[in-house]
Structures are given as C-alpha cells and as structure tokens.
Amino acid sequence: MNTISLHSPRQVQLIVSSVSKVMKTGNIQNLSKAAYNYLYLCSGFIAHFNHAGFKAAYSNVEKLRHHILQNKANNQWNNFRAGEKDYEYYMQKKSIYNELCKICQNV
C-alpha cells in the first residue's frame, strides 16, 4: 500500500514563509513554487494551469487572504483517523493550513 510522502521541515518552512511574505508585502509575486504546490491542492482553490496562472488569479492578495480564511473548515481533513492510510500526511496538511490561517488573521 503506497502512502503520500510528508513535507520535509524545510518544505513546510518554505510554504509558510512564502505565504507570510505575500501577506506582509501585498505582492503575489512573492508566492514560491512550494507554496503554490501546497495551496492549489487545498480544498476551495480552483485549478490553475500553472504557478503564473495562480498568481494572476490572486494578483489581489486580499482575495487570496480571504480564500485561505474562508476555506479553513474545508481543509481540516477531520475524516481521517489515526492508523488510517495517509493520516499523518493529512494532519500535516491541516497543521500547515492552520498556520497559514494564523498569518492571514494577523495581517
């Protein structure tokens, strides 16, 4: 049975720091590829053709902030239970998402 790989501590740091920089500067161009790869797979974010398309769609950083906060409940992955396949992966995604919500709430 294959499982999904967890993000490394460095990957988590890159995601969180990138979104933090976007929110602090108000500049979507600061969105890293790592942060894009994380966000576009979260519930509530429409599929974009690529990183550039995502940045174009969220050129208004307030829109991105709003969508991150609006979709918090949908990105908790509470349907996974300890011991189930990929539980650790989804709990890590939940932790990252909640950190992004904290950043967005404190802007």
Image (cartoon, rainbow, N blue to C red):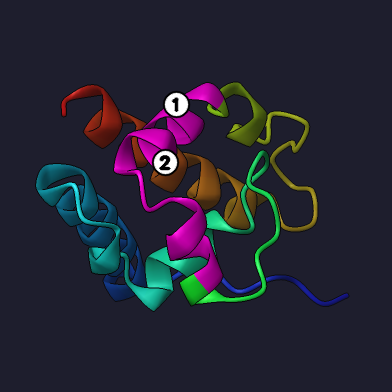
What residue sits right under mark 2 in the picture?
Answer: 64
Instruction: Estimate the x, y position of residue 87 in percent, counting from the top left.
Output: 68, 49
User: Residue at image x 66%, y 29%?
Assistant: 74
Would you call the spot at circle 2 few (<14 residues within 10 Å), some (14-19), or many (20 or more)?
many
Q: In the image, which residues are magenta?
A: 53-70
User: Residue at image x 66%, y 39%?
Assistant: 44
As drawn, which residue projects farthest toward the right? 1
User: Quadrant of the image for the C terminus?
Assistant: top left
Instruction: Estimate the x, y position of residue 24 in percent, counting from the top left.
Output: 11, 44
Horizontal side of residue 49 vs 35, given as left or right: right
Instruction: Estimate the x, y position of residue 89 in percent, counting from the top left.
Output: 60, 57
In this view, 37 is above or below 57: below
Asked if the stretch drawn in magenta spans residue 60, the answer is: yes
Circles 2 and 1: CB atoms closer than 8 Å: no
Mark 2 or mark 1, earlier in chain: 2
Horizontal side of residue 90 vs 66, given as left or right: right
Instruction: Estimate the x, y position of residue 15 in percent, counting from the top left.
Output: 33, 62
Q: CA distance from mark 2 to mark 1?
A: 9 Å
